[in-house]
């Protein structure tokens, strides 16, 4: 298969050749003809296998006809994090070298002014995080009625609890007749069900089973005691002993842990930077750039860095914590072993984490090998007993979906999972100027305060209407966010007397 067989324009093919690609990846070969035929597509392929070009290349081909009008973008791409949105913009620069495309990036944490000026001039491609897009829309600066093509990248994440109301709103603002493309490496069944709400008669292009990990990644487990100092010791030993470690991303479950592990590594004189959603945007960008450019060897990060980031040459991923959600494991380790390169992913597991580990192995459909001694079933049961004896820490051990979690943890995680949508949070002193430019916080629903993901399974298995109704529960934080709700559900209910 060559790029010339896919129906891409000559100018796009020239850009692809200039990028050094000799043949399309499987997702590109299979999805591009359908995109060019204007079909809706649900594209599933492993991490690092070129999903971005699978939508950008046909988009650029299609955009050769027609031109942009002021404030009415022709295409829209939604991304879950600012960094990922910026990366997709870079892709348009690379693949659009032979075109005069106007691309605008609407992301939080930076000023509105430049973004607005671009919109006024008219854009072919709008790449946005949902929160900032809605901010522009609400200021009356943006019309989405000209959008011919909508791309939702990291689709399962975007249809997850935290984002879904925004996505539903945005989908109502774009024409019903638009073409819609979803791309992802993971697709839990309960989320796949809601994709039907957004896709019309889609072609499903599934290159590999959803949630299968890239074959170029060597995965290992390493046991550790559960105490923080023990885990930090284990991590340092892993870094020091790793085979041909060029650089590494170290994932922690919580932002507070990112900070602690970062400080500890710094104290031990490693070359390290930190990245999490509570940092201001300039610090986030600086950390990522330093890591990308090889100026720092280690990046300690929350799941804000788990999705989509394409740093071509990451040799190692370390999970300092076993992730709570099995999909996050797939995305985290997918930061290495990209575009056919080899990579190593090592996960630190404590006896308390064995349930999480089982969920991960079940999702990826294979056991992960231990480096060194495994944690025995007895040790795992012992940890469980100890936990129970200590009164239980529900947040600590919850593994599968649908289990109750400690509220604190749930909240922390929600905000970690929605780094761009921090409207709910009290303004922080370190916020960039953009924060102040936002509409009054009071107008905003507390978006961070959505129901815990634990409720998701039940809610999302219901029909779309009953899902809407359940989100209308009088949780104060949800009240203002009913714009996506069918009108008949918002009418006051009068009860007849008994
Ligand atoms: P995904 O979204 O599937 O995780 P990306 O779109 O980020 O993956 O692409 C991963 C890497 O593969 C990028 O660095 C990209 O430049 C490279 N790539 C994409 N398509 C090709 C191709 N046809 N041949 C070689 N490399 C490619
Ligand atoms: Mg991607």
Image (spheres, helix red, strand yellow):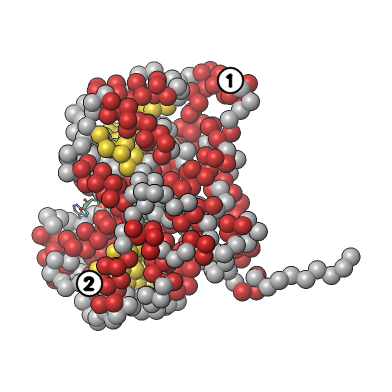
Residue at 39% x, 66% y is 133
The residue positioned 48% from the left and 34% from the top of the image is 356
Q: Position of residue 366 (x, y in %)?
A: 41, 35
- Which numbered marker is on residue 63? none
Identity of the residue drawn at 44% across and 71% down = 138
Is residue 204 rendered to the left or right of residue 37?
right
Q: Residue 314: where, in percent of width, then height?
A: 23, 39
Residue 410 falls left or right of residue 113? right
Tell me the quarter of the picture where residue 229 sits.
Answer: top left
Label 1 near ligand 1 (CB < 8 Å): no
Q: Residues within 10 Å of mark 2 (few under 14, many from 20)?
A: some
Q: Residue furthest front?
A: 429
Q: CA distance from mark 2 to mark 1?
A: 59 Å
What is the secondary structure assignment of the residue under circle 2?
A: loop
Answer few, some or many: residues within 10 Å of disc 1's Cα (few below 14, many 20 plus, some between 14 and 19).
few
Assign a secondary structure to mark 1: helix
Disc 1 target residue: 386
């Amino acid at each position: 298969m060559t790029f010339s067989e896919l129906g891409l324009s000559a100018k796009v093919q020239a850009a692809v050749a200039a990028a050094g690609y000799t043949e399309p990846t499987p997702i590109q070969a299979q999805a591009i003809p359908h995109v060019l035929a204007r079909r809706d597509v649900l594209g599933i392929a492993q991490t690092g296998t070129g999903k971005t070009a699978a939508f950008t290349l046909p988009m650029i081909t299609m955009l050769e006809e027609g031109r942009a009008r002021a404030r009415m973008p022709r295409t829209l791409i939604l991304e879950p994090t600012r960094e990922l949105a910026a990366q997709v913009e870079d892709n348009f620069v690379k693949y659009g070298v032979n075109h005069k495309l106007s691309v605008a990036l609407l992301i939080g944490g930076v000023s509105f002014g430049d973004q607005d000026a671009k919109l006024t001039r008219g854009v072919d491609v709008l790449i946005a995080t949902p929160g900032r897009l809605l901010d522009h829309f609400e200021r009356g600066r943006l019309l989405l009625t000209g959008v011919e093509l909508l791309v939702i990248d990291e689709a399962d994440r975007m249809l997850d609890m935290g984002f879904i109301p925004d996505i539903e709103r945005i989908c109502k603002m774009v024409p019903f007749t638009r073409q819609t493309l979803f791309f992802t490496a993971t697709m839990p069944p309960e989320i796949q069900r809601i994709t039907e709400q957004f896709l019309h008669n889609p072609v499903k292009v599934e290159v590999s089973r959803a949630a299968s990990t890239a074959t170029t990644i060597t995965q290992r487990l390493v046991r550790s005691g559960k105490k923080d100092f023990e885990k930090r010791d284990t991590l340092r030993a892993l870094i020091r002993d790793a085979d041909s470690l060029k650089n590494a991303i170290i994932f922690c479950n919580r932002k507070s842990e990112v900070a602690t592990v970062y400080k500890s590594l710094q104290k031990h004189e490693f070359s390290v930077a930190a990245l999490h959603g509570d940092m201001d945007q300039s610090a986030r960008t600086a950390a990522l750039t330093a890591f990308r450019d090889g100026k720092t060897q280690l990046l300690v990060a929350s799941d804000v860095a788990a999705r989509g980031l394409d740093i071509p040459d990451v040799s190692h991923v370390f999970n300092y914590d076993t992730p709570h959600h099995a999909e996050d494991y797939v995305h985290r380790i997918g930061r290495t072993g990209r575009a056919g390169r080899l990579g190593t992913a090592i996960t630190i597991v404590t006896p308390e984490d064995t349930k999480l580990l089982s969920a991960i192995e079940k999702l990826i459909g294979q056991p992960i090998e231990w480096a060194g001694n495994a944690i025995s079933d007895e040790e795992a049961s012992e940890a469980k007993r100890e936990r129970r004896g200590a009164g239980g820490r529900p947040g600590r051990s919850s593994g599968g979906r649908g289990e109750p979690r400690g509220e604190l943890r749930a909240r922390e995680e929600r905000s970690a999972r929605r780094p761009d949508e921090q409207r709910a949070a009290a303004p922080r002193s370190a916020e960039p100027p953009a924060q102040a430019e936002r509409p009054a916080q009071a107008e905003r629903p507390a978006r961070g305060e959505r129901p815990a993901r634990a409720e998701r399974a039940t809610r999302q298995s219901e029909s779309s209407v009953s899902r809407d109704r359940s989100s209308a529960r009088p949780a104060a934080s949800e009240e203002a966010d009913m714009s996506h709700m069918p009108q008949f559900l918002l009418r006051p209910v009068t009860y007849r007397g008994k």
